[in-house]
Image: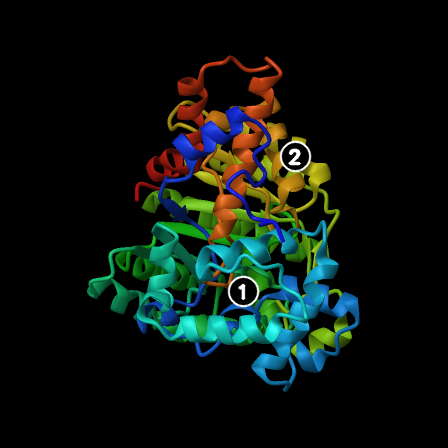
Amino acid sequence: MKSFITDQFLLQNKYAEELYFNFAEKQPIIDYHNHLIPKDIAEDTVFGNISKVWIAGDHYKWRAMRTLGVNEKFITGDASDKEKFEAWAKTVPYTLRNPLYHWTHLELKRYFGIDELLNENNAGEIYENITAQLQTPEKSTRGLLKMMNVESLCTTEDPTDILNYHQEIAKSDFNIKVSTAFRPDKAILIENHNFADYISKLGESAGIEINSYQTLCDALIKRIEYFHENGCRLCDHGLNNISFEEASNAEVSAIFNDKLAGKVIAEKQVNQFKTAILLFLGEIYHKFGWVQQFHLGALRNNNERMHQILGPDTGWDSIGDFVQAETLSRFLNSLDGKDKLTKTILYNLNPADNEIFATMIGNFNDGSVKGKVQFGSGWWFLDQKDGMIKQMNALSNMGLISCFVGMLTDSRSFLSFPRHEYFRRVLCNLFGEEMKKGELPDDIELIGRTVSDICYHNAKNYFDF
């Protein structure tokens, strides 16, 4: 059978090919947001088989398998790793036109040199082939990262994390920079039923008894200082939308105290607390010179029955239709009005909001930093060809795509880095098609510089890695 992942994959004309091979392909990868486990990097984990590194934790694959009717036993249950791989292999032919089909075969080829189309007939042979390869030194966790020309990556940790694995990596001779991003969602989402328990845990990690809103702020500052000392320069927030409901300090303090006392908090009070804590954090991030990221628009844990069984991040989330524009504007404007708006990246999950986000960033790009406020790349359900193109078209039409900091994996898998290749091919074809049509000049050096900036140089400069 003819190879599927050819050199020309997704590149539909000579301009696209020249842009990709001469300006994009060899650029190092800066993966500035992911959910990789730093313990695996610190200990240079050798994965026992393909399922442990490729299927475990990958809720993209899990959703597809469930849709096909695969029993949960072969997804998150007690089936053997080989049986789970075989169940995934049986699913793959049914993922045509889903990005999983492209990602699957890119990853098989780039990491393991496998050019076959995965299916239930060749699953056993491929399982054994890859399992054997994973036992070799060059296919350890660090080896897999080196294979993809990763220059730096940034994992995501809760404020209570002691960052011991990041410390171990920093002391080692590993030449890929591994940093962390501060993710304080659990200190923000006051409506969560276990909020008080988390606040107690946060206080323990900061060495502060949190018994008031002020001591909560003190504890967060201490943890930010600790993260900063350990090389952190980014933070991230996963929220439905940005709240903006103003309140006095006394009101916010009373809301916090009521929550700790087990009282019911009204929706307005929830939004007042979230507004206050986000504005507080925003000013602290500015003080430390961090980049703040906001992932907005996910409707999480829709299936309560399965959420109770398997917990969060197991494949029961979808795109939400939250109101975004007005409160986001007021939040950014409040920080900007004090000249305390740090570098900011906004990611939306609802494609209907693309133009809202693309125009919002222009309101707060003040000339102080190139691309200070960014419209982030297509995220989660949108990190596929169509979603990427729509995001880049909105950014191009409403702003400057030349200032875009490009792609990230947002992944829990060490085999996800070919997504950067996928993005780069889509990017080069987007520009190449317009060059072919005469909508962009026939100037390969001009367009090529823009492509290489988006793939690497913009992120390198923006994050100061």
Q: State whether residue 277 appears in this view.
A: no
Pinpoint residue 155: horizontal percent, then vertical percent. 42, 59
Between residues 214 and 181, which one lies in front from this camera angle?
Answer: 181
Task: Identify whether 433 is placed above or below 260.
Answer: above
Q: Quadrant of residue 126?
A: bottom right
Please give the name of the residue rendered at 57% of the width and 56% of the height, measured from the top-left corner: 105
Please give the name of the residue rendered at 48% of the width and 72% of the height, measured from the top-left corner: 129
Pinpoint residue 329: horizontal percent, then vertical percent. 60, 35
Task: Identify whether 132 is placed above or below 213.
Answer: below
Counting every numbered tag in the picture gives: 2
Locate residue 338 relative to residue 268 in the image: left or right: left
Pinpoint residue 242: horizontal percent, then vertical percent. 61, 46
Q: Which numbered circle lies on residue 390?
A: 2
Amino acid marked by disc 2:
Lys
Q: Quadrant of residue 353?
A: top right
Q: Tell me the crowding category of disc 2: few under 14, some 14 to 19, or many 20 or more residues within 10 angstroms, Cα based.
A: some
Amino acid marked by disc 1:
Lys
- Describe the colour scheme in one phrase: rainbow
- Dot 1 lies on which element? helix
Please give the name of the residue rendered at 42% of the width and 25% of the height, measured from the top-left corner: 448
**Mark 1 sits on what residue?**
186
Q: Tell me the crowding category of disc 1: few under 14, some 14 to 19, or many 20 or more residues within 10 angstroms, Cα based.
A: some
How far apart in space, not on screen, are marks 1 and 2 (Cα)? 32 Å
Please give the name of the residue rendered at 46% of the width and 52% of the height, measured from the top-left corner: 33
Between residues 72 and 104, which one lies in front from this camera angle?
Answer: 104
